[in-house]
Image (spheres, helix red, strand yellow):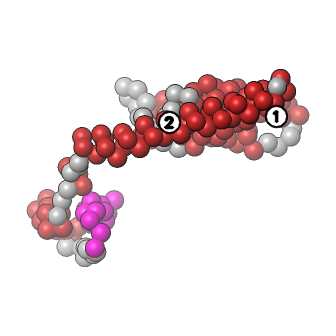
Amino acid sequence: PSMYLISIPFIFIGLLHTIYNSFNNIKRKVYDNWSIILFWFCSMFITGIFLGEGGPIVYRMNAIYGTYLLFTVEGIRITFEWLKLKHVIIAKLFVKVVAFGYAVFFLFFVNYYFRQYTQDTYLLDYFNFTYADVLSYIEDHLDSEVANRITYIGDVGFSYIYYLGSTGV
């Protein structure tokens, strides 16, 4: 639900435009910011493919969404510029339709994330510990050198950070 279907054609348009411009700029030995973004995308994509034993490890590829966003914006811009050459009114209508589409998809996302997803996952097991549970786990399951470290407990309800800090991660 976090990648909107309306973005897919714009991602491809932006990616193809970036590839074309980057190769031309490399041939002409001209610096281009989009070449860096293309290398970023390629490095994330290749790294993600080779990290997993049975397939890509998706959570290690989260930075690729930054390039998706940039390619989407570039794809929308390229499409708008192309439509503006044909007819200005169509280009303005295109912007309104795309903005409306993203607004509708955003509302679907908000509904899913704050209603359905929250109901399905409320009280996540890994984040539903009291501080006493965390401290007793640390004392019972870890080496005495690690378990005897000072653990600072604040007002925040995220006990996992204290576990991570106590284990030296």
Q: Say above or below: 102 vs 86.
A: below
Q: Which residue is mark 1?
A: 26
Q: Which comes before the other along the chain, label 1 or label 2?
A: 1
Which residue is pictured at 83% across the width and 35% down the height? 25
- Mark 1 or 2: in front is 2
* Secondary structure at numbered mark 2: helix
Q: Is residue 91 left or right of residue 57?
A: right
* Secondary structure at numbered mark 1: helix
As drawn, the residue found furthest toward the right would be 28
Picture coordinates of residue 87 (x, y %)?
82, 25
Most foreground residue, 67 or 11? 11
Q: CA distance from mark 1 to mark 2?
A: 40 Å
Image quadrant occupied by the N terminus: top left
Please give the range of residues in magenta.
Answer: 155-169
Most foreground residue, 126 or 42? 126
Q: Which residue is mark 2?
A: 104
Q: Is residue 8 left or right of residue 121?
A: right
Which residue is pictured at 86% across the width and 40% down the height? 30
Which residue is pictured at 83% across the width and 23% down the height? 86
Picture coordinates of residue 84 (x, y %)?
81, 30
> Mark 1: which amino acid?
Ile
Please rate how many residues cluster around mark 2, counting C-alpha atoms within 10 Å: few if below 14, some from 14 to 19, many from 20: few
Please rate how many residues cluster around mark 1, counting C-alpha atoms within 10 Å: few if below 14, some from 14 to 19, many from 20: few
